[in-house]
Structure formats: structure tokens, C-alpha cells
Image (tube, rainbow, N blue to C red):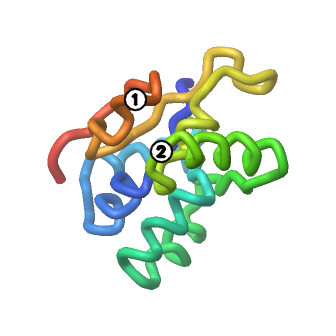
Amino acid sequence: MTPFLMDHTALLALGAGHRQLSGLVVAAAEGEAIGHVPALSLAAAESERGGLGEHIACLPGLDVEPLDLVAALATGALIGRGTDWRIVHAVHLSRPSAEWPSGRVVLSLRPELYAATGIEPVNPGKP
């Protein structure tokens, strides 16, 4: 099972009925995939579409990743270097860690946002 992260663009598309993303969420709910939502990505999606955050948080199979101390320091450093605040938590969580030695795939409908981060997100395609 490949773990995936959904950035704010993927969350907005999911909320609008994106079929491929909906299928991934169903697979995650059935234990066939591992889905994660960075808290800052959720905040960014909520800022663009009020009420979406509660909907996403209720979906089985998607775990909201908190912005803990390590993440706060890492994301703050990325923001200080000019990275868009809406993607910094996804960037941080996608990198290899003790828990995820191979890292995690970021799903984004705007992969160009990640150009200077060293992260290559997967674009799930048009809704």
C-alpha cells in the first residue's frame, strides 16, 4: 500500500466530486490504501471553501496529520524560504522519516506549486 497525502487542491477537488480521488478515499476506508491530510492543507482548503474541512475530517480512511513541534519548525523554515504556506505541511510530511522511510506521495491538482521544493506530486487528473 502506498501512503498518500492530499494537499489543498486535492481536497478541494475531492469536495467537488473528483472521481479518482473519491475512489482513493474509498480504498483507504477499506484498508487498501493509506490516506493522510496535512492539517495546513486542510486549513487552506477550508479557507477557500467553508465547511469542507468538517466534511473531510469525517471521511473514514483519511487521517489528519497534526502540526506538531517538528512540523511547525520545518514548515516555518520553508515559509521563510518563500514556499507557499498552503503546501509546506504536505512538503514536510512527504519527505522520508522514521515512520515513512520511503516518504509519502503528494496528490495535487497544481503540481507546479512544488517546483522549488524537490517534491514531485502526482496529479490525479481533471475531476
Which amino acid does the dot numbered 2 rest on? Gly
Q: Is residue 101 left or right of residue 106?
A: right
Measure how far apart labels 1 and 2 are at the Cα level: 10 Å
Closest to the observer, 59 or 95? 95
Is 117 above or below relative to 45?
above
Residues packed near mark 1 inside 10 Å, few (<14), some (14 to 19) or many (20 plus): few
As helix, strand or loop, the secondary structure at mark 2 comes to loop
**Label for residue 116?**
1
Q: Which residue is mark 2?
A: 82
Residues packed near mark 2 inside 10 Å, few (<14), some (14 to 19) or many (20 plus): few
The residue at the point 51 percent across, 57 percent down is: 41
The residue at the point 51 percent across, 36 percent down is: 4
Q: Which of the 4 image quarters holds residue 122?
A: top left
Q: Which of the 4 image quarters holds residue 70?
A: top right
User: Residue 109: where, in percent of width, then height?
Assistant: 27, 46
Residue 35, visible in the rendered structure? no
As helix, strand or loop, the secondary structure at mark 1 comes to loop
Looking at the image, the residue that sits furthest to the top is 102
The residue at the point 30 percent across, 37 percent down is: 111
